[in-house]
Image (cartoon, grey):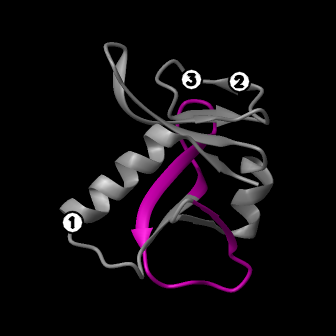
Amino acid sequence: MIHISDKAKSKIQQLKKAADLNGEYFLRVSVVGGGCSGLSYKLDFDNESQPNDQVFEEEGVKLVTDLKSFLYLCDTTLDFSDGLNGKGFHFINPNASRTCGCGESFSV
């Protein structure tokens, strides 16, 4: 399961509305190689499902990830921060053994 905080849900819905994306679009989360810790998170809006996609939906917000990425993201929470320490989405990932200072990459 991948969880979505209330703040992240609200921000995702706001971004979809601002970009005039219809209900067919969902948030695709993936893990790609790169970053100072070896692996990075990637977020995109998408409207095409792929074979082996893992789908999670909470209160009308649909999040999709491929099976390989899900292995790194299991039990992760997607959150959104708008505080003084930085604004944007961030991941609370219990599988990460190390993260970089900016929080955009991790290792397991």
What residue is shown with label 3?
100
Task: Tell me if residue 53 comes above or below residue 74 in the rendering.
Answer: below
Query: How far apart are the alpha carbons under marks 3 and 2?
Result: 7 Å
For marks 1 and 3, give the one nearer the viewer: 1
Query: How far apart are the alpha carbons under marks 1 and 3?
Result: 30 Å
- What is the secondary structure assignment of the residue under circle 3? loop
- What is the secondary structure assignment of the residue under circle 1? loop
What residue is shown with label 2?
98
Q: Nearer the viewer, residue 32 or 24?
A: 24
Q: Residue at x 63, y 38 (%)?
A: 38
Q: Residue at x 70, y 42 (%)?
A: 76
Quadrant hosting residue 32: bottom right
**Magenta span includes 93:** no
What residue is shown with label 1?
19
Q: Is residue 76 left or right of residue 14?
A: right
Q: How many marks?
A: 3
Q: Is residue 67 left or right of residue 37?
A: right
Task: Tell me if residue 65 comes above or below residue 22 in the rendering.
Answer: above
Give the label on residue 87, or none.
none
Q: Tag 2: Cα neighbours inside 10 Å, few (<14), some, or many (≥20)?
A: few
Q: Residue at x 56, y 23 (%)?
A: 100
For marks 1 and 2, give the one nearer the viewer: 1
Q: Tag 1: Cα neighbours inside 10 Å, few (<14), some, or many (≥20)?
A: few
Q: Tell which residue pokes out farthest to the front in this image.
A: 59
Residue 92 percent coordinates (x, y): 64, 32
- What is the secondary structure assignment of the residue under circle 2? strand
Q: Is residue 58 left or right of residue 74?
A: left
Q: Identify the mark nearer the N-term, 1 or 3.
A: 1
Residue 45 percent coordinates (x, y): 40, 67
Q: State the extent of the magenta-drawn residues as a range.
A: 30-58
**Magenta span includes 55:** yes
Residue 93 percent coordinates (x, y): 70, 35
